[in-house]
Structures are given as C-alpha cells and as structure tokens.
Amino acid sequence: MASGKRILVINGHPDPAATHLCAALAEAYVQGARAAGFEVDRLDIGSLDFPLIRSLEDYKSGAVTEDMARAQEAVKHAQHLVFVFPIWFGSPPALLKGFFEQLLRYGFSWSSPQAAMSSVLTGKSARLIVTMGMPTPVFSFVLGGHGLAGLEKGLFLVTGVTPVRHTLLGGAQADAPQTKARWLALAEDLGRRGA
C-alpha cells in the first residue's frame, strides 16, 4: 500500500472531452494512483472558468474566479503535480499557459515581487505527460524541445518544483490502438508508482 502522498492530476488539454487522448491518459494515471492508495484529485483546465491575464495589474490584484481559487487550493494541497497536455505548434496550448499565469499570481504563489525562488510550489515534484503529432526525436532534436524546456526551466525551476520528469508520446494523431493502449498502461503504471 502506498504512503499518504497527495497527487493532483491536471488535464491541460483545452477541450475537456473524455474522447481526447490527454483526458484518457489523465484518467489512467488517476486510476493507477488510487489503486495504489494515493490521495488523488483531478482538474481539467478546459472546464475551468478563468480570464487571461492582460496586464501587470491583473496579475497582481485582479479578481480570482471560484474555479481558479479551487485550483489554487488543490495545487497547494498536493505534493506531486501531474500535467497531461498536447504540444501544439511546438509548445503547450495557450489555455494551459493562461492557467499557469492565473495560478502563479502574487498573494498565492509569490508573497511579493521580491520573493524570487520561493513559492507555494517549492518542494513539490512534477511529472509532465506530453502528447504530440510529430515523432519525439523531431520535437527533441530538430525543434530542440524548446516549448517543454521553457515550461520546465521558466516555470518549474523558478518556482522550486523539483524533480520535474517528463514522458513524451509522439505520433499521437496516428490511428494506432495498440500504441495508445500501451501509453494508457504506462500512465496507469506511473500513477501506481506515484511517479
């Protein structure tokens, strides 16, 4: 039986429909983690109501929606964060970036502009499960994996999330039921291990 580790799984696909691969992968991780005895919660950002940040004033003191307040509490409570999202045009979808901008606002993530390298995320670990239409070597070596590296270094490193591990799944648009079944089994195994 697993320890009392608290895990939050976030489906970062802008469309929360259960028919999407990201939703299925998120659910497979949740099922594996629950079967292992972990305390697990799940968010689907496509179902959340929040505006995009349009100014420094919005970032510092704009209104926080009920959905975002619940998301902030879920993140605060979790010890391990799992983000499942697609790569679109070389980087995560805009709505996922908007979610991070709302989540990491002054007063929640940072106590003040001078609080660099210390946030509510410090000490949490993360797993990124990333789907893409292109083969993973093209993303990693031809494109340099910049969209993912920017997220890992520009967001997680700065906010103190460590370690951050990722699982890249390329060719996601191909009609390959056996491959997708293998990916779902992988996500479930990661959940069982709380990894």
Image (tube, rainbow, N blue to C red):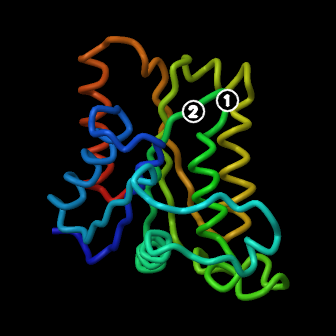
Name the quadrant containing residue 103: bottom right
Q: Quadrant of the N terminus?
A: bottom left
Q: Is residue 54 left or right of residue 85?
A: right
Q: Position of residue 183 (x, y in %)?
A: 32, 31
Question: Is 56 or 41 nearer to us in this picture?
Answer: 56
Q: Is residue 22 left or right of residue 184?
A: right
Task: Say which residue appears at 28% left-offset and 32% top-offset.
Answer: 19
Question: Is 159 or 13 nearer to us in this picture?
Answer: 13
Task: Say which residue appears at 58% left-offset and 48% top-offset.
Answer: 95
Question: Is 103 or 155 nearer to us in this picture?
Answer: 103
Identify the amino acid type marked 2.
Answer: Ile
Q: Is residue 101 left or right of residue 126?
A: right
Q: Is residue 61 above or below residue 174?
A: below
Task: Say which residue appears at 52% left-offset and 71% top-offset.
Answer: 124
Would you call the spot at circle 2 few (<14 residues within 10 Å), some (14-19), or many (20 or more)? some
Q: Position of residue 104 (x, y in %)?
A: 64, 70
- Do the residues under discs 2 and 1 have CB atoms within 8 angstroms? yes
Using the image, tell me which numbered label, if any, was put on residue 180.
Answer: none
Q: Which residue is mark 1?
A: 90
| SS at circle 2 | loop
Name the quadrant containing residue 48: bottom left
Name the quadrant containing residue 40: bottom left
Q: Which residue is mark 2?
A: 87
